[in-house]
Image (spheres, helix red, strand yellow):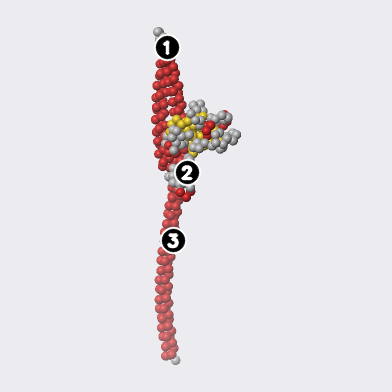
């Protein structure tokens, strides 16, 4: 009995030792797994932080690109506005140039008239002073015309350079479209009624020559025709002639359409209120 009890006690002790050993081993394994899981969690957290930083950087780059695109668009709009202002300034300079030239012509006529007067034996101081004043005004007018002409030429060259850089290249007409080429048209950009001359945004690049016949049209009706005085690559200055029946309200103003006169003159009588091309350009 004592031996059985002793054997049972020894067996129980061995079982306790084995169970304790196994529990310790399992606890170590579980601890290692927990540590590995913690390391993976830390790595995933670091990776998530890195992804967030990269996403923030990408968002900043997208915002920067959007801002750059908007700035380029604004720069383009400013360039187009500057080009329009340059065209208006060139037209204004041409108007002032024509006015100065007309004034110089009037002064030359006055000087010629004074020079043609019969000379008196005793010089008239008042006449001599008047002639001297007219000659001085004439020289000043000629100098002003020369300066304004130089400014106009410079502005026109700058404008042509800007236009060549901004305007799209012309596309050749396809033979499938019939090959017919529509004559170019333009518009009035400046008009000085006092000096009776006009500036049109058509030039020799559109086929205009000093012999070209140009008409001014509004609402499908011819209201005037042009007598060309100067042809530039993209601008024309000209005098105006109105046909009979054109009222003061119908006179030319900026924005009116300018087009080439038809080569073949119609034989039919024009409708009432319209103007025949042959009437606008009478044969000499």
> Residues at badges 1 and 3 in contact (C-beta under 8 Å)?
no
Against 35, residue 149 (above or below) is above
Q: Name the residue under label 3.
A: 48
Question: Reading the chain from its start, which is encountered first: label 1 or label 2?
Answer: 1
Give the quarter of the image for residue 49: bottom left
Q: What element carries label 3?
A: helix
- Residue 215 image position (x, y, % from top left): 51, 34
Q: Which residue lies furthest to the bottom in this view?
A: 1
Badge 3, how many Cα within 10 Å: few under 14, some, many 20+? few
Separation of marks 1 and 3 at Cα, in angstroms: 107 Å
Give the quarter of the image for residue 34: bottom left
- The residue mark sitting in front, 1 or 2, is 2
Give the quarter of the image for residue 1: bottom left
> Residues at badges 1 and 2 in contact (C-beta under 8 Å)?
no
Q: Residue at horizontal 45%, vertical 33%?
A: 211
Q: Can residue 164 be seen in this view?
A: yes
- Residue 101 image position (x, y, % from top left): 44, 26
Q: Which residue lies furthest to the top in this view?
A: 122
Separation of marks 3 and 2 at Cα, in angstroms: 66 Å
Badge 2, how many Cα within 10 Å: few under 14, some, many 20+? few
- The residue mark sitting in front, 3 or 2, is 2
Q: Mark 2 points at which residue?
A: 181
Q: Which of 238 and 18 is in front in this view?
A: 238
Q: Mark 1 points at which residue?
A: 118
């Amino acid at each position: 009995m004592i031996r059985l009890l002793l054997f049972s006690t020894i067996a129980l002790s061995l079982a306790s030792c084995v169970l304790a050993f196994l529990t310790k081993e399992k606890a170590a394994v579980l601890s290692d797994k927990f540590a590995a899981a913690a390391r993976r969690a830390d790595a995933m957290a670091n990776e998530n932080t890195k992804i967030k930083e990269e996403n923030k950087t990408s968002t900043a780059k997208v915002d920067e690109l959007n801002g750059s695109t908007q700035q380029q668009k604004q720069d383009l709009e400013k360039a187009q506005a500057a080009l329009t202002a340059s065209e208006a300034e060139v037209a204004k300079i041409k108007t002032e140039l024509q006015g100065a030239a007309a004034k110089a012509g009037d002064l030359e006529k006055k000087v010629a008239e004074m020079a043609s007067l019969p000379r008196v034996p005793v010089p008239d101081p008042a006449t001599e002073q008047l002639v001297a004043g007219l000659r001085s005004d004439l020289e000043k007018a000629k100098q002003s015309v020369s300066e304004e002409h130089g400014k106009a030429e410079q502005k026109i060259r700058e404008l042509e350079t800007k236009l060549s850089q901004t305007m799209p290249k012309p596309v050749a007409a396809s033979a499938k479209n019939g090959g017919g080429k529509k004559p170019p048209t333009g518009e009035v950009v400046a008009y000085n009624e006092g000096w009776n001359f006009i500036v049109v945004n058509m030039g020799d690049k559109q086929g205009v020559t000093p012999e070209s016949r140009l008409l001014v049209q509004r609402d499908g009706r011819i209201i005037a025709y042009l007598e060309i005085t100067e042809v530039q690559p993209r601008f024309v200055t000209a005098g105006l002639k109105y046909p009979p029946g054109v009222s003061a309200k119908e006179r030319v103003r900026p924005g009116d359409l300018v087009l080439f006169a038809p080569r073949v003159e119609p034989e039919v009588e024009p409708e009432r209120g319209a103007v025949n091309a042959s009437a606008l350009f009478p044969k000499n």
